[in-house]
């Protein structure tokens, strides 16, 4: 089967849209998705799993007699789709009317996503990869054969390495004339490891990388396992830490834990439901003036870039938070209809925290801060969406004079997002490009860390 | 619900000779074992927001997963069609794990030579409708949407009547029905239809400029008859329960202290911090903190920890797991001794034991792995009030959320949504928004008293371990002598 959408599949989506319109729907949006994923996984140096996954689905947003419903099916034979649509239209008619439901106005939707590859996110090499090539890539993730050489003061208990590649192809069309397509490839490697110290204590860690282009993943192939093993071994011999108010440095790998709740608090659904700590805070300086978050959805060749959202609304580059001031809520067409607020893109696409303070890397940040707790991972915890209070379990290290001294254990970071982001001290310039949220290493002063 | 065999064969457009053909193709390159998992899922929901039920939908997911095992190695592929050419293509993709032409598979060839081919613990017989654990009187697929709308409206009215501080109610009713047919190279054929109904309500309260929210949910493997007036009243009562305390609650001073976990939903700690570490895949790979602890005492005598697929109508109930193995009540810890891991067929083969009916998957898109069902600790003999009375200073927890555990280290962190300070043996100030952190094996060892009030929580618990499956959890009131409480 073709790894991208075929003309016949797109024609089926178009015919389904027309069929819904001819059978009672006044407005329709159809999204057709197709994805193909191949995965080869290693366990302790040997091939452990092979996975082949091909998915297709049709999703329908149906607007019938002032009512709305969402439907999907992966049975893509034309007759089955038509029967499904007739049932779906009947179901929508039983719901209560909702005048707020509508398609986005045509002037808001993307006009520049016709081929799917405008952002240069598709690597055609995926069409030529063989099972043997993929196996070799998977073998390349493993370090088990170098076990003896790698074991320095610890033993490798277990390793799992994976290579996968995938193609995702999607078309969205609506009865207002929208047609937009997004095609991307992703090449990904991952490695998880458990090590054991001389006392029998076990420590686990991982590392991963992903890119839209095969050639860009190759340099990470061998280093991925080494990074994960180094991260696991670094946790050996943790010590208690007294905690208290201190400066924390948060590694770029996990820094989204602190920004994601802030972005979620700007979501229109939360605003409409009055379930957000950023209610009525747009336009006010509520965070440090050193915090600026740009949405950068249209960067060519970069993971996470998109020309449009799930409604087909065109993305743009804009500041989500400008020098500590949230500039807007994310209001989709429905929430705009419910609240009377102006519609926007439905969510942040590829948010990027801008560097501040002159540090390039995490080591620069540690040196500049001098002393504190360096957080390399989170373990559980939660935040309160209505107050912004949070409490998270943390993994990481104590550091002094800019150098890591020892791993810490059983610690929590506790606070409120307003206080935290007003205590922003430094933002490095080392965001990982494999992530859709570009958040560099961060430093915050005066933060509660409990043991 | 268990229909006659022919119902499922017709539904998936197949027959037993075709199933044998697929098995033969899947094993053509020398795999030891293969299984086929046919699935037809219909799911839908309606949402009440701002007083109206103006949103809903219905979805179909249909396909076949084909798994080939070669030793303990897994080849997996699936098709979203039951047309034979598509199935054969998937069978060939899965069979690649046993591609004997590649030098890469020397190990598995050696394993075969040593006689370690998949040994069948056979589960003979056809599914028995009389033993069905999914009681259904009214079917979800044929129910009128108006019934769902009426239920949500009743629920909203009942909640709103109970508290004047309510500013928003968001309620969701979701249902799912899954037909499955499973066949394998041991010639076991199993089939059933799994229902699930789930209702949730999130309520936003405001008082004196402060906002609090509370979510309540119920989920059962039953039919539409679960949408009763009694359920409305029960959920409405729970939706506002303890909200006065929530507004008054503060973060307490943290530190090491005794923790009393209330009966019911606190069982999520048992699921996360202990249950996952008992899943045999983590142990087979040596990544679990409980690896090599089989037969050893892991907690006080008298404590029994169970994973149970036999609770009729429970969210974690199963007739068969997703490998066609009959569900069972599995004692993981018996009288304080670790007696069993939770096994799928791969880990059972590795350990030389019978599978425990824990091979589960999210859908045909996933290979099964060991997963929990309904996990709980059996009642002890202490009065819950005595447990609280025995604590000079500590924390009583009645609702956790967002727990996480590191399987290798056993370290866990759980967020306390609500609870109370215990001072001089009495519940005093309400607390919230704190974490409890500890280590799974250490916490198990530190359980010093178990109440006589086991409760299985009826909420919509979903376990994520790379793939989502419905589960439930429970626990009696339990006293842990020391855990770290993170506070101010």
Image (cartoon, rainbow, N blue to C red):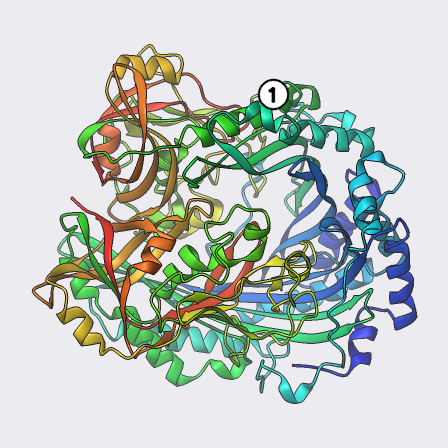
Q: Is residue B470 left or right of residue B448?
A: right
Residue B402 visible in the snapshot: no
User: Which image quarter: residue B44?
Assistant: bottom right
| Secondary-structure class at tag 1 | loop
In this view, the residue farthest toward the left is: B424
Q: Can residue B355 be seen from the camera position used here?
A: yes
Residue sitting farthest toward the top: A358
Residue A219, relative to residue B53: is it above or below? above
Residue B4, position as x, y percentages in the image: 77, 83
Tell which subunit mark 1 falls on: A
Q: Quadrant of residue A330?
A: top left
Task: Give the image location of residue A156, x and y in percent.
Answer: 54, 34
Where does the image place residue A222, in percent across and percent down from the top left?
A: 63, 22
| Residue at point 34%, 42% (across, down) | A265
Figure disc tally = 1
Q: Position of residue B152 (x, y in %)?
A: 42, 73
* Relative vertical location of residue B321 with respect to residue A175 in this rendering, above or below: below
Q: Residue at x 27, y 44 (%)?
A: A391
Camera-side residue of B251 and B323? B323
Q: Is residue A348 above or below residue B71?
A: above
Residue at the image position 70 percent from the left and 24 percent from the top: A214
| Residue occupying image coordinates x 76% and y 29% | A136
Front residue of A413/B173: it is A413
Asked which quadrant contains residue A321, the reply is top left
- Please tell me whether residue B248 is drawn above or below residue A129 in the rendered image: below
Most foreground residue, B50 or B283: B283
Quarter of the picture holding the C terminus of chain B: top left
Taking A51 as reference, is A317 left or right? left
Instruction: Name the residue that disc number 1 marks.
Output: A300
The crowd level at tag 1 (other Cα within 10 Å; few <14, some 14-19, many 20+) is: some
Which quadrant is the N terminus of chain B positioned in?
bottom right
């Amino acid at each position: 089967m073709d790894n991208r959408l075929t003309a016949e599949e797109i024609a089926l989506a178009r015919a389904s849209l027309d069929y819904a319109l001819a059978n009672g729907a006044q407005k329709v949006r159809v999204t057709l998705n197709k994805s193909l994923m191949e995965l080869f996984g290693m366990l302790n140096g040997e091939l452990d799993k092979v996975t082949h996954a091909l998915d297709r689905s049709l999703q329908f947003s149906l607007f019938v007699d002032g009512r709305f419903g969402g439907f999907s099916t992966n049975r893509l034979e034309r007759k089955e789709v038509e029967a499904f649509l007739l049932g779906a239209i009947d179901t929508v008619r039983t719901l209560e009317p909702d005048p707020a439901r509508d398609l986005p106005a045509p002037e808001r939707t993307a006009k520049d996503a016709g081929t799917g590859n405008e952002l240069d996110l598709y690597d055609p090499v995926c069409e030529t990869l063989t099972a043997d090539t993929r196996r070799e890539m998977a073998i390349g993730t493993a370090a088990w054969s170098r076990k003896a050489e790698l074991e320095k003061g610890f033993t490798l208990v277990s390793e799992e390495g994976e290579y996968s590649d995938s193609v995702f192809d999607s078309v969205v069309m609506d009865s207002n004339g929208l047609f937009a397509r997004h095609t991307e490839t992703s090449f990904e490697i991952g490695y998880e490891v458990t090590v054991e110290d001389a006392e029998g204590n076990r420590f686990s860690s991982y590392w991963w990388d992903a890119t839209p282009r095969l050639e860009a993943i190759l340099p990470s192939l061998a280093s991925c396992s080494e990074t994960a093993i180094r991260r696991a071994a670094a946790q050996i011999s943790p010590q208690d830490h007294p905690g208290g108010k201190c400066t924390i440095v948060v590694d770029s790998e996990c820094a989204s834990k602190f920004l994601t709740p802030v972005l979620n608090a700007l979501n229109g659904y939360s605003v409409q439901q009055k379930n957000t700590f950023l209610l009525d805070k747009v336009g006010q300086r509520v965070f440090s003036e050193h915090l600026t978050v740009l949405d950068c959805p249209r960067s060519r060749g970069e993971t996470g870039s998109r020309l449009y959202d799930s409604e087909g609304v065109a993305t743009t580059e804009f500041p989500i938070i400008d020098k500590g001031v949230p500039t807007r809520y994310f209001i989709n067409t429905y929430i705009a209809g419910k609240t009377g607020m102006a519609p926007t893109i439905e969510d942040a696409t590829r948010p990027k925290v801008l560097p501040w303070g002159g540090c390039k890397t995490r080591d620069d940040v540690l040196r500049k801060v001098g002393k504190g707790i360096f957080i390399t991972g989170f373990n559980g915890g939660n935040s309160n969406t209505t107050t912004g209070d949070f409490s998270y379990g943390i993994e990481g290290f104590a550091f002094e004079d800019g150098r890591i001294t020892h791993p810490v254990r059983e610690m929590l970071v506790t606070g409120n997002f307003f206080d935290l982001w007003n205590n922003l001290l430094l933002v490095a310039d080392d965001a990982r490009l494999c992530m859709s949220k570009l958040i560099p290493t961060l430093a915050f002063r005066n933060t509660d860390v409990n043991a | 619900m268990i229909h006659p065999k022919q119902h499922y064969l017709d539904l998936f457009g197949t027959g037993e000779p075709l199933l044998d053909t697929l098995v033969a193709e899947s094993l053509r390159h020398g795999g030891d074992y293969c299984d086929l998992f046919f699935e037809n899922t219909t799911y839908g929901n309606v949402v009440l927001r701002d007083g109206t039920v103006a949103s809903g939908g219905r979805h179909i997911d249909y396909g076949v997963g084909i798994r080939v095992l070669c030793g303990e190695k897994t080849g997996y592929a699936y098709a979203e069609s039951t047309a034979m050419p598509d199935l054969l293509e998937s069978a060939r993709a899965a069979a690649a794990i046993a591609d004997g032409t590649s030098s890469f598979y020397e190990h598995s060839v050696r394993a075969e030579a040593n006689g370690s081919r998949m040994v069948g613990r056979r589960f003979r017989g056809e599914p028995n409708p009389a033993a069905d654990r999914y009681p259904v009187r009214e079917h979800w697929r044929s129910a009128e949407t108006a019934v769902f709308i009426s239920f949500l409206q009743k629920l909203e009215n009942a909640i709103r009547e109970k508290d004047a501080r309510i500013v928003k109610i968001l309620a969701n009713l979701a249902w799912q029905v899954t037909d499955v047919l499973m066949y394998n190279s041991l010639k076991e054929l199993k089939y059933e239809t799994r229902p699930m109904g789930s209702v949730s309500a999130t309520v936003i309260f405001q008082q004196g400029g402060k906002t609090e929210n509370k979510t309540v949910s119920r989920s059962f493997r039953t039919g539409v008859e679960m949408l009763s007036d009694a359920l409305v009243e029960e959920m409405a009562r729970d939706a506002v329960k303890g909200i006065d305390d929530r507004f008054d609650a503060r973060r307490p001073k943290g530190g090491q202290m005794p923790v009393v976990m209330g009966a019911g939903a606190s069982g999520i700690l048992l699921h996360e911090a202990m249950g996952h570490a008992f899943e045999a895949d983590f142990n087979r790979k040596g990544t679990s903190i409980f690896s090599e602890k089989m037969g050893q005492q892991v907690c006080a005598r008298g404590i029994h920890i169970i994973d149970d697929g036999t609770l009729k109508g429970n969210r974690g109930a199963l007739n068969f797991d997703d490998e066609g193995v009959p569900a069972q009540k599995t004692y993981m810890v018996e009288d304080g001794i670790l007696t069993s891991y939770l096994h799928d067929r791969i880990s059972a083969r590795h350990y030389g034991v019978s599978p425990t009916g824990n091979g589960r998957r999210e859908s045909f898109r996933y290979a099964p792995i060991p997963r929990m069902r309904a996990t709980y600790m059996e009642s002890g003999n202490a009065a819950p009030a005595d447990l609280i009375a025995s604590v000079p200073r500590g924390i009583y927890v009645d609702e956790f959320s967002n727990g996480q555990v590191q399987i290798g280290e056993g370290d866990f962190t759980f967020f306390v949504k609500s609870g109370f300070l215990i001072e001089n043996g009495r519940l005093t100030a309400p607390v919230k928004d704190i974490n409890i952190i500890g280590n799974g094996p250490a916490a198990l060892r530190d359980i010093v008293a178990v109440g006589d009030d086991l409760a299985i929580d009826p909420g919509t618990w979903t376990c994520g371990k790379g793939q989502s499956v419905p589960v439930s959890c429970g626990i009696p009131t339990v006293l842990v002598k020391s855990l770290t409480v993170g506070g101010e």
